[in-house]
Amino acid sequence: MIASADFNITRVERSKLHSMTLENIPFGKYFSDHMLEVDYEDGEWKTVEIKPYQPLLLSPSLAALHYGQAIFEGVKAYKNTEGKVNIFRPYDNFKRFNISAERMEMPKISEEIFMEGMKELVKLDANWIPDKPDHSLYIRPLMFSSDEMIGVKPSSKYKFMIILSPTGPYYSAPMRIYVEEKYVRAVEGGVGFAKNAGNYGAAMYPSAEAKRKGYDQVLWMDAFEHKYVQECGTMNIFFIIGNNAITPDLKSGTILAGVTRESLIELLKEKGLNVEERSLSIDEIVSAFKEGVLSEVFGTGTAATISMIKELRYKDFVMNFDVEKWEIAPAIKTRMSDIKEGRAEDKYNWLVTL
Ligand SMILES: *Cc1c(COP(=O)(O)O)cnc(C)c1O
């Protein structure tokens, strides 16, 4: 473990908090006083700098801008009822970050830098965590290649950073979803399981097309048959059919292994549902809907936790859901925020308390 003495900490002279209130702040728009920055050079990570949040000076030849070696993570910190700071399952994000790094031929980050660096930074900016229900501090670790040279090859230099963004209640209205049959997000052998920047850039056109047709997001299908469900936009997806909660399994490498997905699997079991991780075809979903046994459909992710789906359109067939009558998704959402915000016991050991 690196002791805090090994982090080079430069504090701001005056916090930006004096000039703003942490109420109903939009997601991802404001950043805290400090950031973490560390460079990888000559085969090793150099001194970790925690310093005032500031722009970077970059060369136009920066490798990441041309060839997209760039990965990120999303984690949240909460203040509990006693004012203590809890970070939700950051170790899972650490592991996933290095899985993404490996797939993108980027160096791994050490547990010390990722975990201790994050804790140190969050501690320093703890005042930025709004202590209101459903408010949190969004933690964004990222890494990109930083060679200043044009040439398609893995970079020899990289930069790892962590920035923090306070966020208000992330209300996500029930969504209308378009089952996408033309464009694909991920293919077996590809990078669907990695949180690399390019996945999101490539998804913007199909998502915008869905919006132009009046939908909120697309439901991604497999690349070969356009038949098996993958994910909903940038969220994992769950279907409640009878007493079963079904979510696509991770075997194909096309699904991002969400920490929220993993947590929901536990909480759905706790609620007495039979959880199945398996491949699920759109035909099975349509049949279940027609039989009246498909009761709830929702997406899961760190930003919104659970987003309910009120309409699912496959070709000309429209499936509507009366989300007001749902019992499972709202109950799980409450259970999840009770754990995260310290109102319920952390029986699965998900929280890292500072
Ligand atoms: C980040 C992400 C998710 C959700 O992961 P969480 O760890 O639950 O936030 C799901 N799908 C995609 C494509 C993602 O990028």
Image (spheres, rainbow, N blue to C red):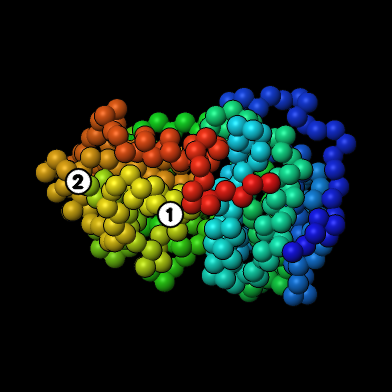
Q: Element under label 1?
A: helix
Quarter of the picture holding the N terminus: bottom right
For residue 158, above or below residue 89: below
Asked which secondary structure carries label 2, the reply is: loop
Q: Is mark 2 within 8 Å of ligand 1?
A: no
Instruction: From the top left corner, tell me how far across and down residue 221 is, in percent.
Output: 31, 56
Q: Position of residue 194 (x, y in %)?
A: 50, 62
| Residue count near mark 1 (Cα–Cα under 10 Å), binned few <14, some 14–19, many ≥20 | few
Is any part of residue 62 visible from this angle?
no
Q: Is residue 326 above or below residue 146?
A: above
Occupied quadrant, residue 77? top right
At label 1, the amino acid type is Glu
Q: What residue is shown at x 67% (from left), y 43% (from top)?
A: 164
Query: Who's the residue at 38% across and 52% down the image?
Result: 265
- Which residue lies under the disc numbered 2? 242
- Rendered view: 343 above or below 9: above
Is 53 placed left or right of 26 in the picture?
right
Residue 49 in the image: state x and y as whole percent: 81, 55
Q: Residues within 10 Å of mark 2 (few under 14, many from 20)?
A: some
Amino acid type, callout 2: Gly
Contact (Cβ within 8 Å) of mark 2 with mark 1:
no
The residue beneath circle 1 is 262
Residue in front for this viewpoint, 144 or 348:
348
Name the residue located 66 percent from the left edge and 64 percent from the top edge. 111
Pointer 2 or 1: first along the chain: 2
Determine which of the numbered discs, if any, sits on residue 42 in the image: none
x and y percentages locating residue 233 in the rendered image = 41, 47
The response on whether ligand 1 sits within 8 Å of label 1 is yes
